[in-house]
Amino acid sequence: MTTIKQAMLGDWTSIAPEVRPSASKNADGSLKPFYLKRAFKYLPSDRFELEIINSADPYGAVPLVQIKIAGHMLWRGAHPIAPGAQKVDFVADDAYEVTPLAQGFADVLNKVASVGYAPWAVSSPQSIFGKAFAPFGLAEGTNFMEYDLVYLRGDLLFWGARNIDGRGFDTEQNRPTNLQIPLIRK
């Protein structure tokens, strides 16, 4: 495991905008797509920083929100998806910040996440660390955590693919069983 940790050190980024199923549904019951780009840093002492830009479109031309989280990775042992894959829990126990990038998104946050926050405004980040934040299902006093996986192959870093029914990685039973589009070394 020390070998994968050493090889992962550094900066990783999305190859192109990615699509995932979200927990939200369209009027017909189908899952809404969630478009994003990721920038990930794996740091010494099992620390990480992750920046996500969520977009309204599959090409990333209309950014809606920037999300920054930082914390620790807890290594849980081998994952059966591929030789060398590891179960990893990502715990956002250092920082969690949201920055609206579109007025419509700021307007929504001002309706659904106003208690305990300054008015949401475009390009104005706010920490949601340790606070209740209904849009992401965060409860006050708890750290965001995901039961995920990592698999490194050359300069490609894979995490787990989102569950196709929109379930999050919120329990060991929901830990991913497939690989998603990889990040590339920056």
Image (tube, rainbow, N blue to C red):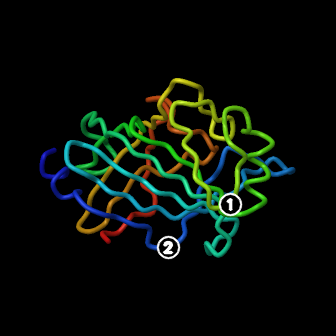
From the viewer's perspective, is 47 left or right of 26? Answer: left
Instruction: Say what secondary structure mark 2 lies in.
Output: loop
Whether residue 92 is situated above or below residue 104 in the rendered picture: above
From the viewer's perspective, is 80 left or right of 143? Answer: left
- The circle on residue 104 is none
Q: Residue at x 68, y 42 (%)?
A: 118
Residue 114 position in % (x across, y down):
74, 38
Q: Residue furthest front?
A: 118
Q: Residue at x 68, y 58 (%)?
A: 33
Please tell me which residue lies in front, 182 or 70.
70
Residue 30 position in % (x across, y down):
76, 51
Inspect the image, locate mark 2, and give the three-letter code of the amino acid beneath it: Ala
Residue 38 position in % (x across, y down):
47, 61
**Mark 1 and mark 2 residues within 8 Å of each other at the beta carbon:** no
Give the image quarter of residue 185. Answer: bottom left
10 Å crowding of disc 2: few (<14), some (14-19), many (20+):
some
Whether residue 86 is situated above or below residue 76 in the rendered picture: below
- The circle on residue 16 is 2
**In whole angstroms, how far apart are the C-alphas of marks 1 and 2?**
24 Å
Q: Which quadrant would the C terminus be assigned to in this image?
A: bottom left
Q: Which quadrant would the N terminus be assigned to in this image?
A: top left
Task: Name the residue tied to disc 1.
Answer: 122
Instruction: Say what secondary structure mark 1 lies in.
Output: loop
Residue 12 position in % (x across, y down):
34, 64
Inspect the image, locate mark 1, and give the three-letter code of the amino acid beneath it: Val
